Image: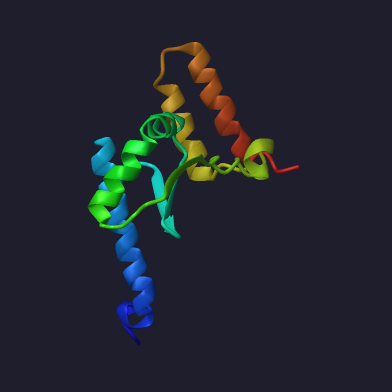
Amino acid sequence: MKKINQLLDEGINAKLHQLDELTEIIAHFFSIPVENRFWPLLKNQRVTLLTDDPHLATQARFQQHLLRKYLSTCLNTNIRSVDIKVIGLPLASYEQKTGDYRLSDATANTLQSIAQGINDKELQDALKRLAATASRPLA
């Protein structure tokens, strides 16, 4: 079996390294953790910053000219523009919307035992109703 490094083309490997470096530079500019929810793309001296965080997008839009200059300096290249785009999170699947899911018997038993130890009557009844859905067949 080949190692993963042997399967990756050198161009792909260089591009991935470039994107990692770009991500670190942008995270440093905004003083946010690298694990934050943004994904930079670099193509034809244009940076497109994708994010699902509207607050980060607003901050980036106000500072996009400073970010362009900062990236040009750090990457030693002329970045022509920085575009910021907010991407939507995937919508919940149809099954989740309709409630066509089933609890396992073990989960139902756990919910029943938790409900017995709760003093709040409304919460106890809600947990018992939830546990009862495990025994119902799907429609």
The x and y percentages for residue 98 are 69, 37
The x and y percentages for residue 20 are 30, 57
Picture layout, residue 70 above or below residue 16: above
The x and y percentages for residue 39 are 41, 49
- Whether residue 50 is visible, yes or no, is no
Picture layout, residue 113 above or below residue 29: above
Picture layout, residue 56 above or below residue 83: above
Q: Quadrant of residue 14?
A: bottom left
Choose between 13 and 113: the one closer to the eye. 13
Q: How is the image coloured?
A: rainbow
Choose between 109 and 77: the one closer to the eye. 77
- Whether residue 63 is visible, yes or no, is yes
* Residue located at (33% from left, 40% from top): 67
* Residue located at (31% from left, 78% from top): 5
Choose between 28 and 124: the one closer to the eye. 28
* Residue located at (53% from left, 42% from top): 87
Choose between 57 and 37: the one closer to the eye. 57
Picture layout, residue 76 above or below residue 57: below
